[in-house]
């Protein structure tokens, strides 16, 4: 296995959609390539299987990877021959600049960050577009750090490989969050799709914790439709996200009284915005204008006014987007 090949696979694994940038992310993992590629085990792996590569990344001491997120090392029963690390903590509590703003409104927010799209080898964003993947919040703030990325990969693997123990741990942490909020005089809010797009309602969590406000953004039109039709529990709130290829669906959600989120390149948000919709023959028209609400004032989407465009400033990689995901005004 040549050094360059290993690097290429590492890049593919973590940022498989950024290949065209020709950027080398392998340094994030502090891997000593020359020594590592000499080891027998490494030579014997089939690097076409990304899961095997994940195992390689997740075995810190033997293979010289530092800054690995801490967790118990257990044998995995999935049959992939991979190993699973259970991170000590699934939820992050008010640890980003945006969610902490919610404390002004007496909410304390816990977020679950998984490894978005297919970065863990498992897809957690069924309808992610090229633009949203390239601009994903996964790369904003602390998310850029290698240890953070590995922690997210471990959580995602845990969810897919040992669903029951993952959900048990999640329930324990939700209960803890509720108690913590009570003690500190806050109301509990939880966003389970910090960097994923999973329908957590299938696990019954919203009904189990009726006092918690759960909220999300989604790229999945069917879920947004279900939400505007009132088919989710009352303590759940969902905002449909605009990307470069779902304007017709986004307009439909607005017409039905729902909200959509739109990422703008400029920090100066427009007061109103209309969607430019083009057909296959490139015949375009503009929709009715909808009021733009500044979604960066807090992350508490369930407090937003009804039937608005939730405007968000571009962050991280989104600042350089040229797919049409980020809107210019
Ligand atoms: S759907 Fe959301 S979490 Fe998934 S890649 Fe796109 S922006 Fe990131």
Image (cartoon, rainbow, N blue to C red):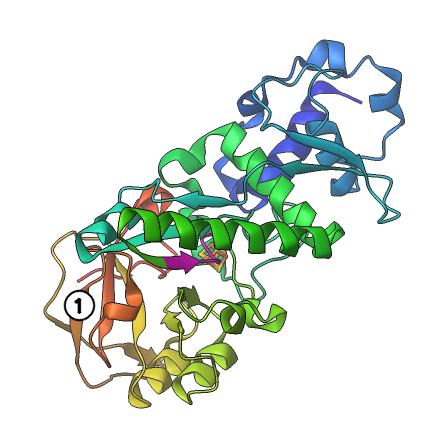
Q: Is residue 137 magenta?
A: no
Give whichever of 131, 229 is nearer the camera. Answer: 229
Task: Give the magenta-colored segment's residue range.
Answer: 189-195
**Left or right of residue 197, residue 11 in this image:** right
The image quadrant of residue 316 is: top left
Q: Who's the residue at 70% across and 32% down the image?
A: 72
279, above or below 99, in the image: below
Residue highlighted by disc 1: 293
Q: Is residue 191 magenta?
A: yes
**Left or right of residue 26, residue 21 in this image:** left
Report crowding for label 1: few under 14, some 14 to 19, many 20 or more residues within 10 A (C-alpha): many
Q: Who's the residue at 23% across and 63% down the image?
A: 311
218, above or below 315, in the image: below
The image quadrant of residue 279 is: bottom left
- Locate the C terminus by quadrant: bottom left
Give whichever of 201, 309 is nearer the camera. Answer: 201
Q: Is residue 102 visible?
A: yes
Residue 280 spot, x, y in % from top left: 44, 81
């Amino acid at each position: 296995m040549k050094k360059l090949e290993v690097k290429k696979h590492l890049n593919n694994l973590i940022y498989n959609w950024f290949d065209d940038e020709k950027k080398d992310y392998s340094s994030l993992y502090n891997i000593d390539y020359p020594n590592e590629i000499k080891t027998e085990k490494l030579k014997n792996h089939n690097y076409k299987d990304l899961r095997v590569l994940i195992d390689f990344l997740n075995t810190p001491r033997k293979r010289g990877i530092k800054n690995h997120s801490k967790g118990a090392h257990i044998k995995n029963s999935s049959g992939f021959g991979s190993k699973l690390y259970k991170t000590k903590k699934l939820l992050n509590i008010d640890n980003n600049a945006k969610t902490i703003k919610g404390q002004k409104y007496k909410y304390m927010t816990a977020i679950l960050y998984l490894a978005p799209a297919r970065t863990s080898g498992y897809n957690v964003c069924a309808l992610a577009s090229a633009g949203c993947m390239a601009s994903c919040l996964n790369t904003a703030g602390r998310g850029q750090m290698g240890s953070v990325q590995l922690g997210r990969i471990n959580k995602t693997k845990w969810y897919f490989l040992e669903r029951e123990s993952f959900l048990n741990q999640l329930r324990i942490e939700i209960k803890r969050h509720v108690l913590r909020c009570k003690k500190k005089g806050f109301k509990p809010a939880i966003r389970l799709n910090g960097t994923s797009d999973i329908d957590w309602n299938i696990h019954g969590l919203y009904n189990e914790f009726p006092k918690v406000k759960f909220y999300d953004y989604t790229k999945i039109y069917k879920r947004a439709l279900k939400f505007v039709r009132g088919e989710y529990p009352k303590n759940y709130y969902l905002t449909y996200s605009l990307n470069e290829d779902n304007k017709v669906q986004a307009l439909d959600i607005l017409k039905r009284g729902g909200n959509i989120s739109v990422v703008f390149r400029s920090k100066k948000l427009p007061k109103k915005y209309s969607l430019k919709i083009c057909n296959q023959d490139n015949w375009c028209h503009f929709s009715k204008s909808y009021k733009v609400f500044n979604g960066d004032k807090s992350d508490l989407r369930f407090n937003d006014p009804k039937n608005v465009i939730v405007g968000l400033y571009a962050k991280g990689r989104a600042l350089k987007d040229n797919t049409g995901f980020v809107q210019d005004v």
